[in-house]
Amino acid sequence: MTVSYAKLWKLLIDRRIKKTDLKAAAEISPGTYAKLNRDQYVSMDVIGRICGVLGCDVGDIMEILPEQDMSD
């Protein structure tokens, strides 16, 4: 399975929040911020802090996608 944070980036756009402002408010490290940008897994602690800052639920900022079979 893969993870997508597309919902997070859309939510930031809708609320006119800059990524750097979220990074500071949620105290996200540069390495974790890079993982978010590359749609890689981050800790639930980070997800929780982001949700706390934005006042939203986990499903509002991320989704788990099934692996795509590349053999076809």
Image: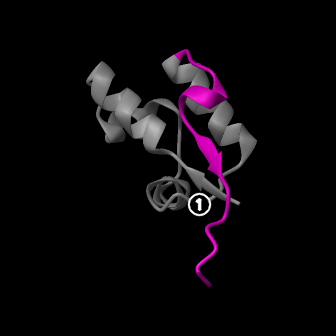
Residue 59 part of the magenta segment: yes
64 in relation to 12, above or below? below
In the displayed structure, 18 sits above or below 52; it is: below
Residue 34 image offset from top left, x and y in percent? 47, 60
x then y, percent, for residue 32: 55, 55
Looking at the image, residue 68 sits to the left or right of residue 9; the answer is right
Per the rendered image, the range of residues in magenta is: 55-72
Check the image and name the residue furthest to the front.
72
- Is 7 magenta? The answer is no
Q: Name the image quarter holding residue 18.
A: top left
Q: Which residue is mark 1?
A: 40
Which secondary structure class fits the magenta region best? loop
Number of other residues with Cα within 10 Å of mark 1, as a class: few under 14, some 14 to 19, many 20 or more: some
Q: Nearer the viewer, residue 11 or 32?
A: 11
Q: Viewed as shown, does residue 53 lie left or right of 24?
A: right
Rendered image coloring scheme: one colour
Q: Is residue 57 above or below residue 43?
A: above
Which residue is farthest top?
Answer: 55
Say which residue appears at 64% left-offset and 74% top-offset: 69
Location of residue 71 in the rendering, given as x and y in whole percent from the top left corner: 62, 84
Q: Position of residue 14 (x, y in %)?
A: 30, 23
Q: Which residue is pictured at 62% across the width and 29% down the height?
A: 59
Q: Nearer the viewer, residue 67 or 17?
A: 67
Which residue is found at the position 53% from the left and 60% from the top?
Answer: 35
